[in-house]
Each structure stands twice: as C-alpha cells, then as structure tokens.
C-alpha cells in the first residue's frame, strides 16, 4: 500500500509539472500574441489617421507600432512617410500664419516641422527669419532705458563748434608767383577774417587758379597746396601754421568721452580701439563696464561708431543634453571549495603541550603513539550561486548658453583619495619619519564641457569635451584606489534642431577565477566539479545626445554693414565720403571711337587667324565637354512608369559602362509637389564580395534636391554598377521627372570622366 501511495504521489507530481509547463507555454504564447496585436492595432489606427490627413496622430500611432515591433520594415516605411508629410504640413501652416502676420504661431509651426524632419531646410530658413523679426519687434516695442535716455540727451546737449562769420560771396583768384602772405591779405579783405601766423610760418611764392569758389573752399585748397593748416581762434580770427605732427599736437583740440558698455568687454574693446582707430589714451573701468577715450573729435566720433557696432548682445542657444549610463553585472559561482588548501598537524602528547609548543617529559617517548598527533583538515563548501543586476542612470539637463561661452556639466560624486607623506619626527630627538595622511577629493562620474558658436547661416559649431571617470579597484589600507578614465574631445557642426549621438564608450570587464587541487583543476570536465569556479562580467555603456536650438541670433542691423570713411593714414577719423571719381565708370575696353574704328562698320569680315591662334583654338575645343569622348552613362531606372498617388516608387541609380570609376558627385532634382523622398539606401554594388567604398547622401524635400557622393576604395567588378536605391512617396498626381543637374566623375587616375545621365519620367495618377 505504501508503494502504491508513493507511485501515485510521483505520478501526481509529474502531472502537475506537465500542467505547469503547459500553462507557462500558453501564457508566453498569449503575451506574444498580445504584443503583435497591439502593434497591428496601432498600425491600423495610424493608417486610418493618415487617410483622414491627421498626420500628427498618424506619427504617434506608427511610433507605438514600432515600439511593439521594431524590426517591421512596413511600419518604418509608413513612419518615414508620415514624418515627411507631417513636416511639410506644419511648414505650410507656418507659411499661412506668416502671411497673416502671426509670427509666434508661425514660429511654433516651423519648430514642429523641424522636429519631425530636421532636414527641412526651408522650415529652418523661415524659422531664422522669424526669430530676427521678433527680435526687431522687441527692440522697437521696448522703452528706452534710463541710461539710453541720458545718452540721447547728452548727444543733443553737445557744445556747438566754433564757426567763422565770413563773407559768402564767391571768389575768383588767378594769380601767378604771388607771395603767400600777400595772398592771405587778399583773402582777409574779401572775407573780413583776420589771419594770424605761427612763429614757424615761412612765406613763399605760389600760383593760384581758382574760379567761382567760396572763401572756405579757397582757403582749404591753398592750405593743402602749401602744406599748411588752420585753427579757428574765434568767429573772426584764424591762425595759420605748418602742417607737421608737432604743430598738430600744439594746436589740435582734444575731447574726452566715457562710453558705458552693456554687452561688450571693455578690456577687449580697448584693444580693438587701439588697433582700428589708433587712439592711444584710453582707460577702462571694469566695475562700471566703461571705457574712456581722449583724442581728436573725429577720432572720438569714430570710436563711438565702432562701439555702437560692437556693443551688441550675443546670440543664444538652448542645448538639450540627454545622458544615459547603463550598467550590467553578472556573476556565476559554482563548484567545490575548501576552507583552506592545506592540512595542519599538531603534536600534543601530554599536559605540558599547548597550542604553540609541544613540550613533554623524556620518559614519555616510549608511550608516544598516533593518538598524540592532532590533524586539522579543511571544511568543504558546495557553491551554486548566480546573480544578474542591471541599472540605468538617466539625466536630461536643458541649458541656455550664450554664443562662444562654455557650459560645464558635472554628474557624479567626489571620492576622497588618501595621500600619505613622511616627515622627520624631531620631537623625540631621533631621525625617524612620521607618516601624515591627507585626503584629496576626486571627481568620479561624468564631466561635460560645451562651447557653442552660432553661425549666421543657422549652423552651430560646438566644442565638446566629454570625460567619464570611474573606480576600477577600491584599493586597500595601503594602496589607493585605481581610477579609470574615458574621454572624448572633438568639434562637431550641427544644424538648428539637429541631434548628435555619441555612443560606444563601452567598458566591458570579465574576470574568471579557478581554485582547486593541483592537477585535478586542469582536467577538462572534473575541474568544473571538484574546483571552485567564479565568473564575473561588468559592462558599462554611455550614450550622449546633444540637440541645439537657436533662440536668438546676433543683433546685426543694416547700418552695421555700411562702409564708413575714416580719413587717411596721416589723419584718421570719422569723415564724410569723398566725391566720386569721374574715372571710375570708364570701361577698361576702349570704345570704338577711341580705338579709331569707324562707327557703323561692325559687320566687317574678320581677319584670317594665324597658325598659332588656330592651334590654340583647336586645343581649347578639344578640352570642351562637347568634344570629350563619352565613357558610359548614369541611368535612373524604375520598374514603374506610372504609379497611383499614395503608392511608393523605387528608383535605381546605375552606372553603366563607366570603367575605372573612383569618385562620383551627383546632384539630382525632382518635383517636390508630386514626389517626396523618404529614404536612400546603398545599391547592390556595396554587397559585392570584397567591395570597399562609402556613399554619402543628403536630400531636401522642400527644394526637391538630392546630393550623392560615392568614393570607392576597390574598383574591381563589372561595368554595370547599381550605386543607390531612391525611395519616393507620391503625394500628388501629375507628371514628374528625376534628372541630374550636376555631375562630377573621376577615374582611378583622378581624370574626369564624361558620362551621360538619362532622366526618368514618371506619371502619377489618381487611380
């Protein structure tokens, strides 16, 4: 009866085990079915939303479907199509709001278009234009600050310059070999202006031929001719002096002005002022952010204009940084391990023996036997342990940074590192050294430094320094811990709202430990049973994404781009523009009259060419593309010549008969109103055995352009090469063509290859 009960229990346990396994299998199948159903349902909802032209909802549903089935090509193709169309839709919405004058709503729409398709250059240009317009509106609507009001009042309250009160009747002066002082006396009588002369003035004979000029113009021309200058003493008095640096320093009046800067660095402006204007007397007050200039009035005016251009707020960029640190640790420990790999023997014959000594009396030698020896054998432990731990640390800071300013991100801990130094111990009178331990705080974790530079065309250059430090060994009481390091230092160039990904900073540590009996631990199978085996795997990976978004461009006005006349090398200062030269408009080619050819006889037969000219002309004709021999063709091929609107279109780019192809640069054009490019993939050429090469690709759906660049390291293969596959989505009905507008093909000797490129015509129908 007992045996029957045991057999029944075993059968019952076996039945329960089979039932449990069957339940687990059913649950697993049901989970897989639910996941597939969830992805399919989301995809169907996306298709319905796309059919209703609810493009944003379609993108969300397609993303959910891909989350359940990441490798589904159909889901990804539909997502790309929805992303491009949604981006174009928001671009059109932004243009509509822009035409209505609503800049803020149009900015939001263009920003959404860029988020859906970062390669939408048209939306990027419109966004930059709107940012500039909003900044101009902000400046116009802002009230003047108190300092700006004071500056305006100060400019209006300037002391008026000294003016001459002279007779403004035109003069006629035609004199030859007249004494200079006598000439000034004649001017004095006609203008009622009294002339004084410097002590170093020397009179000389001059010839003057002036007709119908006013007094001021006549005076300046005479002084320019005789290398003199004048200074106004009062409204009726002028002093004449030689035009030398010493006399200029003696008579020229200086002015002083203090400029309060809002954005520029005064010390940097001081260097620029000294370099551009030549002002030597400048002083900087960093506390008030001012710069004081003392020089000639025209130079001070030049400094003021220069500071108006330079003292502008910097551009700003918003940087989204996402840092993901993934840690994974696995440990497996199994086998047999002894507490110690040795056997201790102790001789303990009598009561005089202790744990450290084996003492006994000599008369007991005859009574020693095996019971007087004590053996200590190791204990045995059986190990069966497996552990698996995963952790993910995620940080997503958002930083607003000024142009060309450095931002630092520190994520981690400060770990004390012990440092021991030895100093002589003088207190005891000996030369023994005494240890002194101090601690230094070491940064452990992630350190990031970013320095953005915003370009006027919407590109952003960022200097990136990334450093990851970690403790590889905790250290002991004697040895300090060991610190590992991973660092990257680079400069990247991104477009507005473009994301850069930095990954692959993987640290993978694997340790295998084997402890056992010599010889037995070397046997292939028994070493896993009669030895202690320990395997540890530690993996750490860092993923860093950076997305810059321009929120403010440099505040550049139209007046900042004008030319300003600043005198000569001898006299630098802000001045009016000189009169234009009448010779600037004369063409370098002589006219028919100047060349002596009669008018109206241009149809004369040309003279016969010389022999050298014929050879040169023939050589030039041979170098023209029309005369070059065609060495193949580039073919755009598609299986479909007509396609229904909404259906995909695949186009192959094939190089047929192009021998010795090394590099290819090709620019294609298509009608963006009918076709929208969704993807570019490498052709069959890249799958050939032993092939080495690279294909660089970019496209702009708004402008309808595709740029392809092919570089081959290995040019072996047939004469027909499938270079790329272009995948289009048909958005409207009509006739469209895909054609090459620029080609540049080089062979292995870097010689240009002339090849024809046949265009592809496609018709898109409604049904």
Image (tube, rainbow, N blue to C red):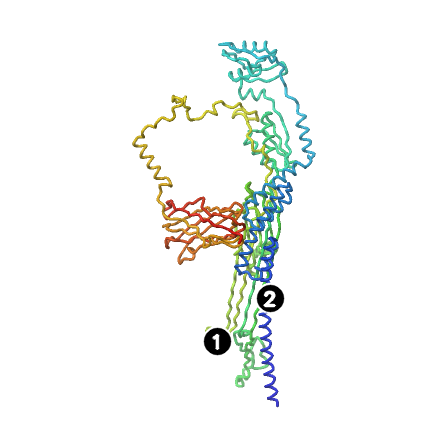
Q: Which residue lies most toward the bottom here? A: 1
Q: Residues within 10 Å of mark 1 (few under 14, many from 20)?
A: few
Q: Vertical placement of 473 versus 562: above or below?
A: below
Q: Judge the density around disc 2: few (<14), some (14-19), many (≥20) Cα neighbours within 10 Å.
A: few
Q: Quadrant of residue 617?
A: top left
| Viewer-proximal residue among 53 and 140 | 53
Q: Circle 2 is placed at which residue position?
A: 34
Q: Secondary structure at mark 1?
A: helix
Quadrant of the rendered structure where residue 357 is? bottom right
- Across and down, in percent, residue 123 comes to 57, 45
Compared to residue 93, the image places residue 602 above or below, namely: above
Foreground of the two, 736 or 59? 736
| Residue 438 shows in the view | no
Quadrant assignment for the N terminus: bottom right
Q: Residue at x 54, y 79 (%)?
A: 375
Instruction: Work out whether 555 lies above or below 247.
Output: below
Q: Secondary structure at mark 2?
A: helix
Q: Which mark is residue 526?
A: 1
Q: Which is nearer the N-term, disc 1 or disc 2?
A: 2
Q: Is 681 in front, or is 668? A: 668
């Amino acid at each position: 009866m007992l045996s029957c009960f045991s057999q029944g229990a075993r059968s019952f346990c076996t039945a329960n085990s089979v039932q449990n396994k069957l339940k687990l299998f059913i649950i697993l199948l049901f989970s897989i079915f639910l996941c597939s159903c969830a992805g399919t349902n989301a995809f169907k909802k996306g298709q319905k939303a796309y059919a209703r032209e609810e493009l944003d909802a379609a993108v969300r549903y397609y993303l959910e479907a891909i989350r359940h089935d990441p490798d589904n090509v159909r889901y990804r193709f539909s997502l790309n199509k929805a992303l491009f169309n949604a981006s174009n839709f928001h671009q059109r919405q932004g243009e509509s709001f822009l035409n209505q004058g609503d800049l803020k709503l149009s900015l939001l729409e263009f920003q959404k278009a860029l988020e859906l398709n970062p390669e939408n250059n048209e939306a990027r240009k419109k966004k930059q234009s709107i940012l500039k317009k909003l900044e101009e509106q902000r400046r116009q609507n802002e009230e003047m600050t108190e300092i700006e009001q004071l500056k305006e009042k100060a400019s209006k309250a300037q002391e008026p310059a000294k003016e001459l009160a002279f007779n403004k009747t035109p003069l006629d002066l035609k004199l030859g070999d007249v004494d200079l002082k006598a000439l000034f006396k004649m001017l004095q009588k006609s203008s009622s202006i009294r002339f004084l002369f410097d002590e170093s003035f020397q009179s000389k004979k001059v010839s003057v031929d002036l007709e119908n000029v006013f007094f001021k113009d006549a005076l300046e021309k005479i002084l320019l001719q005789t290398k003199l200058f004048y200074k106004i003493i009062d409204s009726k008095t002028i002093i004449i002096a030689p035009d030398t640096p010493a006399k200029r320093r003696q008579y020229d009046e200086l002015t002083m002005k203090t400029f309060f800067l809002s954005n520029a660095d005064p010390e940097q402006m001081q260097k620029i002022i000294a370099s551009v204007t030549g002002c030597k007397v400048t002083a900087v007050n960093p506390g008030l952010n001012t710069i004081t200039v003392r020089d000639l009035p025209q130079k001070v005016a030049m400094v003021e204009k220069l500071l108006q251009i330079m003292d502008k707020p910097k551009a700003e960029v918003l940087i989204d940084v996402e840092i993901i640190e993934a840690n994974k640790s696995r440990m497996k420990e199994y086998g047999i391990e002894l507490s110690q790999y040795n056997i201790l023997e102790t001789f303990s014959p009598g009561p005089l023996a202790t744990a450290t000594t084996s003492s006994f009396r000599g008369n007991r030698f005859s009574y020693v036997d095996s019971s007087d020896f004590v053996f200590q054998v190791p204990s045995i432990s059986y190990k069966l342990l497996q552990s698996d731990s995963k952790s993910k640390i995620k940080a997503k800071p958002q930083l607003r940074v000024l142009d060309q300013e450095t931002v630092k991100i520190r994520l981690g801990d400060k770990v004390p590192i012990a440092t021991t130094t030895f100093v002589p111990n003088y207190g005891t009178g000996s030369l023994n050294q005494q240890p002194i331990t101090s601690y230094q705080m070491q940064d452990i974790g992630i350190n990031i430094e970013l320095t953005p530079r915003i370009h006027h065309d919407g590109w952003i250059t960022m200097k990136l320094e990334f450093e990851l430090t970690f403790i590889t060994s905790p250290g002991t009481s004697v040895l300090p811990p060991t610190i590992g390091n991973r660092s990257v230092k680079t400069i990247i160039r991104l477009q507005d709202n473009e994301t850069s990904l930095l990954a692959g900073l993987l640290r993978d540590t694997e340790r295998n430990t084997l402890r056992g009996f010599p010889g037995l631990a070397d046997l292939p199978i028994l070493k896993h049973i009669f030895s202690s085996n320990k395997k540890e795997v530690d993996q750490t990976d860092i993923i860093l994404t950076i997305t810059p978004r321009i929120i403010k461009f440099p505040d550049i006005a139209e007046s900042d781009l004008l030319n300003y006349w600043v005198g000569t090398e001898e006299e630098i200062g802000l001045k009016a523009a000189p009169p234009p030269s009448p010779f600037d408009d004369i063409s370098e080619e002589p006219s028919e009259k100047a060349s002596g050819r009669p008018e109206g006889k241009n149809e004369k037969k040309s003279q016969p060419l010389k022999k050298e000219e014929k050879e040169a002309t023939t050589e030039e004709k041979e170098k023209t593309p029309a005369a070059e021999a065609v060495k193949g063709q580039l073919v755009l091929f598609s299986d479909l010549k007509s396609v229904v609107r909404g259906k995909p279109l695949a186009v192959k780019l094939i190089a047929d008969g192009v021998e010795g192809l090394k590099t290819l640069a090709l620019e294609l054009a298509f009608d963006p109103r009918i076709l929208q490019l969704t993807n570019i993939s490498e052709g069959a050429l890249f799958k050939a055995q032993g092939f080495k090469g690279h294909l660089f690709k970019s496209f702009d759906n708004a402008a309808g352009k595709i740029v392809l660049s092919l570089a081959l390291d290995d040019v072996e293969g047939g004469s027909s090469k499938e270079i790329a596959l272009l995948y289009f989505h048909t958005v409207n009905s009509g006739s469209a063509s895909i054609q090459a507008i620029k080609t540049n093909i080089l062979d292995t000797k870097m010689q240009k290859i002339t090849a024809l490129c046949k265009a592809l015509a496609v018709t898109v129908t409604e049904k």
